[in-house]
């Protein structure tokens, strides 16, 4: 099956610093990648949708200057949390979608971000 | 209520029993998908059913879709302790569109 990796799996940073999370599709070309945030024992909240080579589409209430998304290639998307604060602490998950099954999203293992 | 609501929120059964989870949604859809998430991990895709399909099987999984009632069910037969996880349904309104996830059902299978 399609494999999506995410790096790092865990990160602890100080308040005010920026953190970059990478999402890679390892064995297929992802025309679209999605970034989600998940709070403990809660469902996934879609943050943004990114298509290769174009600007990401952010969901209502998600600050695009705070959560920078870059989808530079068909296998890599990055999420940068800028000037992180403790309230940004969360579980961030990416997913990738592409051929041969365009409707299925394949998820990365997630990144646990803790901002001190 | 939200698109993609699972019922029940939590389910605890004994190994060997069957587990049934339900999902309701509000808008018309192109497809509905079920995912599993182990604690602190990413989601694993289980099965996709399209709006013109009524039932689909994959191993011990059986998914039904009733578009007239805007509901779906996931049945896990002969459950195992390893099936313990959260299960989410997700709906796609058009082919290739974003998915809207439900709140999930926490399944616990006791050995």
Image (spheres, grey):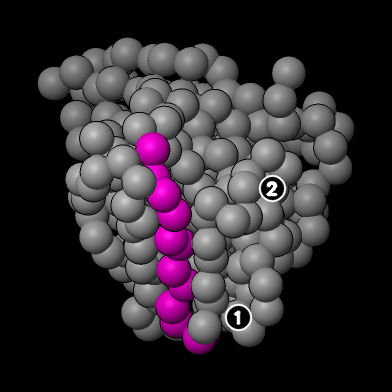
Q: Position of residue A89 (x, y in %)?
A: 35, 36
Indicate which disc residue B98 carries. none
Q: For this view, does B32 lie left or right of residue A94?
A: right
Q: Quadrant of residue A71?
A: bottom right
The residues tagged by marks 1 and 2 sit, at their Cα atoms, a distance apart of 18 Å
- State the residue position of label 2: A59
Q: Is residue A62 above or below residue A33?
A: above
Indicate the secondary structure of the residue bearing disc 2: loop
Span shown in magenta = A73-85
| Number of the label disc, if any, that sits on residue A52 | 1
For the C terminus of chain A, which image quadrant? Answer: top left
**Secondary structure of the residue carrying numbered label 1:** loop
The numbered mark 2 sits on a residue in which chain? A
Q: Chain of mark 1?
A: A
Q: Is residue A73 above or below residue B90?
A: below
Question: Which sits in the foreground, A35 or B75?
Answer: A35
Vertical order, B108 against A20 (above or below): above
Badge 1: residue crowd in 10 Å (few <14, some 14–19, many ≥20): some
The answer to whether the residue labelled 1 contacts the one labelled 2, judged by CB atoms less than 8 Å apart, is no
Sequence-earlier tag: 1 or 2: 1
Give the quadrant of the N terminus of chain A. Answer: bottom left
């Amino acid at each position: 099956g399609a494999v999506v990796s995410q790096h790092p799996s865990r990160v602890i940073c100080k308040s005010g610093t920026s953190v970059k999370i990478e999402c890679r599709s390892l064995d297929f070309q992802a025309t679209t990648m999605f970034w989600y945030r998940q709070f403990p024992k809660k469902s996934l909240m879609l943050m943004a949708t990114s298509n290769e080579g174009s600007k990401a589409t952010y969901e209502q209430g998600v600050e695009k200057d705070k959560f920078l998304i870059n989808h530079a290639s068909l296998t890599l998307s990055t999420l940068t949390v800028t000037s992180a604060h403790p309230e940004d602490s969360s579980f961030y998950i990416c997913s990738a979608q592409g051929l041969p099954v365009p409707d299925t999203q394949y998820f990365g293992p997630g990144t646990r971000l803790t901002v001190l | 209520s939200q698109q993609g609501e699972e019922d029940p929120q939590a389910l605890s059964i004994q190994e060997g029993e069957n587990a049934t989870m339900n999902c309701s949604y509000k808008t018309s859809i192109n497809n509905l998908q079920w995912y599993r998430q182990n604690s602190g991990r990413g989601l694993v895709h289980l099965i996709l059913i399209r709006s013109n399909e009524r039932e689909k099987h994959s191993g011990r999984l059986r998914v039904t879709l009733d578009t007239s009632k805007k509901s779906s069910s996931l049945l896990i037969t002969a459950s195992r302790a390893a099936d313990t996880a959260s299960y989410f349904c997700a709906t796609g309104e058009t082919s290739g569109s974003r998915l809207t996830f439900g709140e999930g059902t926490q399944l616990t299978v006791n050995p």
